[in-house]
Image (tube, rainbow, N blue to C red):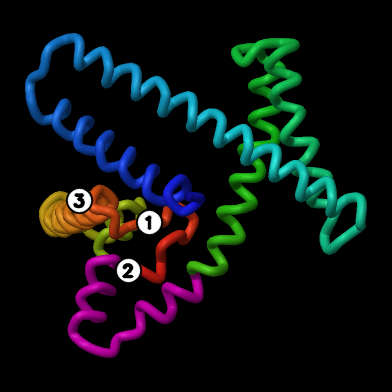
Amino acid sequence: MSLIIKRNIPMIITFILGLFMTFVYFFEVPSSITNIENTFNGWATIIGALVAGIGIIVLLRYNIRRIQRRRGDWIYSIITVVSIFIFPVISLVYGMKSSTFNLWFTILNRNLGVAVYGIVLFALTGGVYRAFRVRNINSFLLILSCFLVMLQIAPIGEAIWSGFPSIGNWMLEIPNTGAFRGLMIASVFGTLAVAFRTLIGYERGYLGGLGEEEK
C-alpha cells in the first residue's frame, strides 16, 4: 500500500498533468480549460514558494547547529543566518524600494559578488592554461578565435589594427551564433527526452529513488 501511495499515485498524477499541460499549450482549447491551466500554474507557484521556504528553514537549522557546536568554519554560519534575516527585516521596516534597502543590498550583494568572481578567476586561470595549450588543430583554432575576440573587446585591439573589431564582430555574429544555436537545439532535444521519460515513468528522480530496482 505504501509503495502505491509513494510511487504509483505520483507517477499517475505526473502523467495526467503532463499530458494535460502539453495539450493545452499546443492546441486551442475552450476558456474553461484555460482557466484550469491557470489554476494549475498558480498551484505550481505556491508549491515553489513553499519549497523555497522549506529550503530556508533547512538552511537555518543546519547553520544554527554548526554555530551551537562550533563545527568547522562556524563563523560563516553566523554570517549566513544574519544575512537571511537582515533583508526581510529591512524590507518590512523600510520597504524594498527604500534607499536603506538598496544600500544594504549594494554593500553586501555587490561586494560578495566581486569576491566570488575574484575567487573564480583563479580557477579559470588554471582551466584556461590547460585549454589553451596547442596540441592539435582544434586547440589552435580555439586559441585563435579567443585571441581575436579579446582584441575586439579590448581597446588595444583597435589601436593595433582597425580591422580587429570587424573580425571579432564577425566571429561573434556568425560562427558563435551558429554554434550557440546548435547547443540550444541539442539542449531542447535533451529536455524533451527527459520530459518524455518522466511522463512514461522511466525518470523517477522526483520520487526520491523509489523503484530504481525496476528500471
Relative to 167, 125 lies left or right: right
Q: In front here: 32 or 63? A: 32
Is residue 24 visible to the viewer in this orientation of the structure? yes
Residue at the (70%, 26%) spot, across then down:
87
Relative to 64, 48 lies left or right: left
Residue placed farthest to the left in the image?
28
Q: Give how far across and how far down residue 78 sits, in percent.
A: 83, 45
Task: Give the amino acid type for the residue marked by disc 3 in the picture.
Answer: Leu
Q: Residues within 10 Å of mark 2 (few under 14, many from 20)?
A: few
Which callout, 2 or 1, points at the residue further toward the start of the chain?
A: 1
Q: Main secondary structure of the magenta part?
A: helix
Task: Give the amino acid type for the residue marked by disc 1 in the picture.
Answer: Arg
Find residue 14 and report its image quarter: top left
Which callout, 2 or 3, points at the residue further toward the start of the chain?
A: 3
Q: In front here: 7 or 64? A: 7
Which callout, 3 or 1, points at the residue further toward the start of the chain?
A: 3
Instruction: Tell me the magenta residue range.
Output: 125-147
Marks 3 and 1, how far apart in space?
15 Å
- Label at residue 204: 1
Q: Is residue 94 above or below residue 15?
A: above
The label nearer to you, 3 versus 1, is 1
Residue corresponding to mark 3: 192
* Residue 130 highlighted magenta (yes or no): yes
Residue corresponding to mark 2: 215
Residue at the (26%, 42%) spot, across then down:
15
